[in-house]
Image (tube, helix red, strand yellow):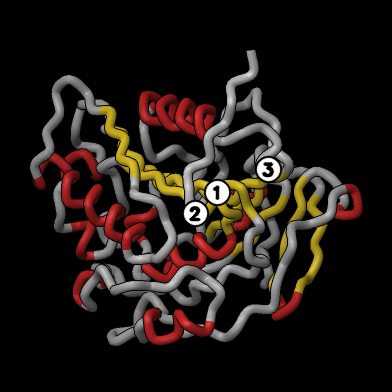
């Protein structure tokens, strides 16, 4: 993997190391020798699809060759995976966007949720991340690894110890050893996944038993890059879609749904479209779907 140069503003020192299969991981702020990188693994070859493929291969066909949780069924039809803009996602996100895509109320709700569900000292993967992770600033984690499509955005994220760039719509394989993470989070990005079943299967594989996967979203989106099944749905149907993504993989606990809605909220399709393009004056609704690998751990509160 190569990264682009010519950052617009001074960035922290970045060290680069290379792992099997030419996967590169970047460390921010300190040399790699100061902290060992998370375990990587040479994984079996899996089917992959480009954002522009008209008939992408089914991830269920090769699920048995991976150590990830078995994919029970496919949630989306081929039509439901399509995008209005079929160009590769790496091209669409080539230019950095140093903005937040949701309002302060949503961000506050998400940070509170992370504060509640992610223990200090955890090993965290921020999937489909950007220049902010919305993790509680007062909590220290063992490490936070970021994934995304723009290296400049990820390099600006102060919470990331390492990051890597990968298009999950071209290849869903995650180059980490099984049972590597206590938590995986994905904020306001699940709507762009064309093969969510395989991505959720990979997340299951890299989570430790009892590890949590938190998927959060609102009604905002890049309309031309969201999949058809998401783009054409209501907020309710989108929640159910993420629930089905979890349920398509053996081993996740029953998904838990969290909703925080503004007092006056238009849940219609038109209202969602207006909000997604910034034409709504209301606050952003907050949705999260949460599940654990195998079981939900119970922690005793320290008095």
Q: Residue at x 56, y 74 (%)?
A: 67
Q: Is residue 141 visible?
A: yes
Residue 90 in view in this figure? no
Question: Is there CB contact under 8 Å for labels 3 and 2?
Answer: no
Mark 3 and mark 2: Cα distance apart in space = 40 Å
Residue 95, x across and y down, in percent: 51, 57
Q: Is residue 142 left or right of residue 267?
A: right
Q: Quadrant of residue 266?
A: top left
Indicate whether 11 appears above or below 55. Answer: above
Q: Is residue 213 left or right of residue 77?
A: right
Secondary structure of the residue carrying tag 2 is: loop
Q: Secondary structure at mark 1?
A: strand
Query: Which label was assigned to residue 293?
Result: 2
Q: Nearer the viewer, mark 3 or mark 1?
A: 1
Q: Residue at x 44, y 45 (%)?
A: 214
Could you tell which of marks 3 and 1 lies nearer the N-terminus? 3
Q: Name the residue beneath numbered marker 1.
A: 211
Which comes before the other along the chain, label 3 or label 2?
Answer: 3
Mark 1 nearby-residue class (10 Å; few <14, some 14–19, many ≥20): many
**At 42% across and 71% down in the image, what residue appears?**
198
How far across and how far down the image is residue 204, in percent?
A: 50, 61
Task: Name the residue: 54% across, 78% down.
Answer: 66
- Quarter of the image with the C terminus is top right
Q: Which residue is mark 3?
A: 9
Disc 1 or 2, which lies upstream in sequence? Answer: 1
Residue 224, compared with residue 181, is above or below; it is below
Count up the numbered dots.
3
Residue 61 found in image quarter = bottom left
Q: Viewer-nearest of labels 3 and 2?
A: 2
């Amino acid at each position: 993997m190569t990264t682009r140069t010519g950052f617009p503003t001074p960035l922290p020192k970045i060290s680069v190391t290379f792992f099997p299969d030419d996967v590169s991981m970047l460390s921010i702020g300190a040399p790699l020798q100061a902290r060992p990188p998370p375990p990587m693994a040479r994984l079996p070859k899996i089917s992959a699809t480009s954002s522009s493929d008209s008939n992408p291969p089914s991830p269920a066909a090769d699920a048995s060759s991976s150590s990830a949780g078995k994919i029970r069924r496919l949630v989306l039809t081929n039509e439901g995976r399509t995008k209005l803009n079929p160009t590769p996602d790496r091209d669409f996100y080539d230019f950095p966007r140093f903005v937040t895509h949701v309002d302060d109320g949503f961000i506050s709700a998400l940070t509170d949720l992370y504060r509640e569900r992610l223990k200090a000292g955890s090993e965290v993967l921020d999937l489909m991340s950007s220049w902010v992770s919305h993790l509680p600033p007062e909590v220290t984690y063992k490490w936070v690894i970021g994934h995304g499509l723009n290296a400049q955005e990820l390099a600006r994220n102060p919470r990331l110890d390492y990051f890597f760039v990968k298009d999950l719509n071209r290849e869903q394989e995650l180059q980490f050893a099984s049972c590597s993470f206590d938590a995986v989070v994905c904020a306001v990005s699940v709507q762009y996944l064309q093969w969510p079943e395989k991505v959720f299967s990979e997340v299951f594989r890299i989570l430790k038993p009892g590890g949590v996967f938190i998927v959060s979203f609102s009604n905002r989106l890049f309309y031309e890059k969201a999949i058809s099944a998401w783009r054409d749905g209501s907020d309710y149907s989108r929640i159910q879609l993420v629930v089905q993504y979890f349920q398509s993989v053996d081993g996740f606990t029953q998904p838990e749904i969290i909703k925080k809605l503004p007092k006056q909220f238009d849940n219609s399709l038109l209202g969602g479209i207006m909000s997604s393009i910034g034409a709504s004056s209301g606050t952003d609704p907050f949705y999260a779907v949460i599940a654990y690998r195998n079981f939900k751990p119970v922690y005793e509160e320290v008095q």
